[in-house]
Image (cartoon, grey):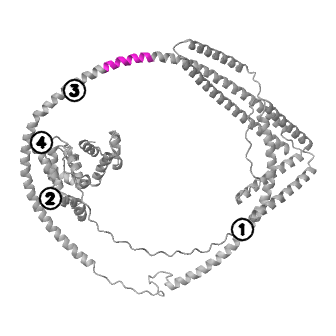
Amino acid sequence: MEAGELFQHCVAIIDSYRPLDVSADSHAEDYIKEKKLASCSAQDKAFMMEIFGGYIRHRKVVDVVVESFFNSDGHRYVLSEKNTYTVACYTILFRAEEMGIAKLTDFIISQDWSKMWTFCRFLINKQNLLTWIKDEWRKIYEDDYVNEVLLGPLIDNFDSLHSIVDFLRELQDTDAEPRGHVIKRDPTVPEPFTLTKPKPRKIPTPDVIPKMKPVKKIPASTYQEPETQKKIAEIRDQNRQKAQENLMKANQLQFACAAPGKVSREATERSEEIVQSADYATRSGEYGNFKSAPAPSRPNDVAVKLNTATILREERFFKEKENEVINKLEQLQAGAKDSSEFLQWQKEMRQQDFDQELANIERRRLEGLLSHEEAILAKKRAAEINRERANLVKDEAAARMRQYVAMKLKESEETRKLVEQVIMGHKNAKHAVKKIQDFKQKLAQQMSLENKELLRRAFEEAEAEMQQKQEIIRQIRVLESLPRPRNKSFDPTEIAGFGLFGEMSLAELRERLNLAKINQEKEEAEKRDSILREKVEKENQIVEAMETINRHRSEQTRAAAIRLEEKRREQYREKPETNNPEIQKLQKLLEQKKQERINRQIADQSNPAISAVRMSDLKREKKDVEAGRYESIDKGHEAMVKRQANGLTGSARANRIALGS
């Protein structure tokens, strides 16, 4: 990016800043995005953001110089150009060493030469810097900061900075070279550094290697099975033996009111139906010959770690189940009836609902296929209409393009004539501007001499006042540096003497703390013994709860196997035949739409506008779309069947629980 354009962007960022509407951190980034400056380099973006951030940070310092300039030398310039002098002032004060004199000169002369020469002559002036500008800065910052940070670099590089003023004066006098002219200087010749030769390093003494301590052997208990697992295995074997004994006693002492013979016959018939349905499913090809992979084998002796709360919660759950079963048996002994008839009626009604749902699914599938066929036909009709519209649009676009080319040629000719007129006007106005500038220079020189005399008197008065203040400060610091006696003896057996209740000495306090520590240790020992007793009682309770849980889990495992067989039988149930007249009507309508689509395809093949390659692509796309649609419909149908099968399995489970009770 050119120096002038970069300068104008820096001024525009400061002009558009509104502190009440946006923060200073994000304003520069928002300006770059708004002006679409993403194409410029990262170095230019960083420079603009640094100029804006530095101005916000040193705003008071820069405003002192710029406002003073408008009150003295720049009173004839407009205030709308204030930020132009603000950017120039900040770069000279804080970025001169970083940019270098050559880049700084190019950056300054990219603006109006006369204005920049007036401002630089005002700022790069030792008398102004060391008198009233320094006093104004000292009102804002401390003397050390003003002398070292603000004035130090300017005084050190004053000759280099003053060369900018001389160069601008030459441009004012000659006015021959164009703006943006680059000063050619001789290349810098590097000089070698005068470095001190390093002394030879001493040979370090070797460190003593420490000996490793003998490592303790790994205890044998690490490779042994813990005693807890052995105890759990013994308890499990004992529980299994007790369960087998209880099962034998229960088979011998069955209740007469529960009709065990009838239940056993129904269970036998149920198992035969499961086997027959499984054989039929394997012979029939309704669901295909797919066979899922077997479940991964898992060891049965994996110990599941349960916490105390889980064990007690599960024990309470099983006890509640036992109480419910006992209550049901007591009701049966008293002559109550079971719910087998209601469950049978419920099963039949659910079967009817399931068949009706299958019929609705088939109807929706046929309606979906029918709408798909209609969409294909509508798409072909729309393609023909769009083809005709495209031809009309192409003709209109060609006519508009011809009109646009003629209009552009006419505008370019008018622009060329206007540029020639503007160039002639600039040449005539240049001589008038030269005379006005000479008159203004003479007037400015007279005013500058008067200002220098006033500034010299103010500087002398300020120096005298500053010397008087420094003498007072020196006397105050001498008084503060005198030493003071601060010695005091301490006796641990004496009290502080503040007159408080319960006031005691340091020795008495230590004695009381020792007694309190002994009492606290006694309380901790008693509490530790009570915790151990409670822990033993809790472990005994948990062992009893684990025995109850293991007994019930073995019963639940046996019941789960029966439920799994019921679920498999429901999954392989035959699909009912559909005799719904509405579905048959939809099937006939679907066949008619397919035949209409086939006839249209045959007609399209006879049309020479469509090639054989395009026709094969259309067929392949249609085949892929239909295959994906059929697959999604079949998957939805299978998911619905599985959901209904799970519902029937839940009802069968309720029947089995009622019969078992």
On screen, residue 19 versus residue 119, left or right, reads: right
Q: Label 1 belongs to which residue?
A: 221
Determine the image quadrant of residue 454: bottom left
First in sequence: mark 3 vs mark 2: 2
Residue 77: percent from left, percent from top: 15, 45
Earlier sequence position, callout 4 versus callout 2: 2
| Secondary-structure class at tag 2 | helix
What amino acid is found at the position of numbered circle 1 in the picture? Ser
Give the secondary structure at mark 3. Answer: helix
Whether pointer 4 and pointer 1 mark residues with C-beta atoms closer than 8 Å, the reply is: no
Q: Position of residue 551 (x, y in %)?
A: 81, 54
What residue is pinned by disc 2? 126
Give the class, few, some or many, for how many residues have Cα within 10 Å of label 2's Cα (few <14, many ≥20): few
Question: Tag 2 or tag 1, which sits nearer the N-term?
Answer: 2
In contact (CB < 8 Å): disc 1 and disc 2: no
Q: Which mark is first along the chain, 3 or 1?
A: 1
Name the front one of labels 4 and 3.
Answer: 4
Q: Residue 213: which disc?
A: none
**Structural distance between the alpha carbons of marks 4 and 2:** 27 Å
Q: Secondary structure at mark 4?
A: loop
Q: Check disc 4: other Cα within 10 Å, few if <14, some if 14-19, many if 20+.
A: few
What span is colored magenta in the figure?
A: 390-404
Q: Please tell me whether mark 1 or mark 2 is closer to you in this view.
A: 1
- Nearest the camera: 353 or 341? 353
The residue singled out by tag 4 in the image is: 175
Please give the residue where the numbered disc 3 appears in the rendered image.
415
Q: Is residue 192 left or right of residue 600?
A: left
Give the quarter of the image for residue 439.
top left
**Separation of marks 3 and 2 at Cα, in angstroms:** 51 Å
Q: Amino acid at mark 4?
A: Asp
Distance CA(mark 1)–CA(mark 2) = 89 Å
